[in-house]
Image (spheres, grey):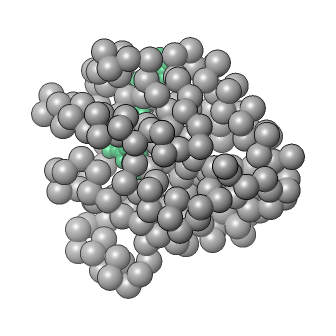
Amino acid sequence: MAARVGRNDFQILVLSGPSGSGKTTVVERLINESTVKLVKAISATTRPQRKGEVDGVAYYFLTTDEFVKRRDQGDFLETAEVFGAGYWYGTLKSEIQRAKDNQGWAFLEIDVQGALKVMEIYPEALTIFLQPPSLEVCEQRLRNRATDSEETIQRRLRKVHEELALADRYCYQVVNDDLDRAVDEIKTIIGKHSL
Ligand code: ADP
Ligand code: 5GP
């Protein structure tokens, strides 16, 4: 069970879910609508920047050499090669500190491997797994998003099963069927843990 924390206390909120489950969409809504101040931890990644993604906003885009150097320096809370395609993702410890400095909760949108690591380090973290209504819907959303090649979509879909198998390790599972309903459910969960 996640720890109860005071309204002004620090908490780590982790959101995971398969590609296409709607994490990015839900994160944006929560940042704007949550009554608790959520500070999105900006991850570092070595994957190529997508059109429209701003360095330092969507991610810190690093070369592999830069990423390895920072990992070896101990700058990361966790790292993972999320899709087995040679691209690395990681949460910088400085992002947790930035949330604390801003009197907000650190909001991590990370994969299941990273989330398990965070659960080890911060057992009191509030963890939420976003479930797609079905695998078909997940695939359809990835295609409609139109940001990835067919090869990338296939790689992401192969990972869905690995992620779903770990869903019960999270404090809560929320189905992102209707976006408003799912966002409301998460806001209620956050509210319960901030009393
Ligand atoms: P993720 O970050 O988990 O890969 P995205 O947030 O990019 O997923 O969502 C994938 C696509 O699905 C986007 O085009 C988004 O607009 C759409 N989407 C997200 N949530 C819903 C929902 N509840 N109903 C319909 N479409 C959704
Ligand atoms: P994207 O679509 O941005 O290429 O990939 C996002 C995937 O990487 C999602 O599964 C997301 O949760 C995960 N991810 C993003 N940042 C991090 C991070 O810092 N650490 C880990 N472990 N996974 C991350």
Residue 188 horizontal/vertical position (percent) = 75, 32
Q: Is residue 84 left or right of residue 59?
A: left
Q: How many marks?
A: 0
Q: Residue at x 72, y 69 (%)?
A: 101
Report which quarter residue 62 is drawn in: bottom left
Q: Is residue 65 above or below residue 133?
A: below
Quadrant hosting residue 80: bottom left
Residue 142, placed above or below residue 100: above
The residue located at (26%, 57%) in the rendering is 81
Residue at point 43% right, 23% down?
132
The quarter of the rendering in which ligand 1 is drawn is: top left
Is residue 37 left or right of 84 when viewed as pictured? right
The location of residue 146, given as percent across then percent down, is: 29, 25
Res 75 seen here: yes
Residue 44 in sight: no
Q: Residue at x 75, y 49 (%)?
A: 37
The vertical placement of 185 against 1, above or below, is above
Q: Nearer the viewer, residue 55 or 96?
A: 96
How far across and down, in percent of the image, does residue 95 sit?
56, 66
Q: Residue furthest left?
A: 151
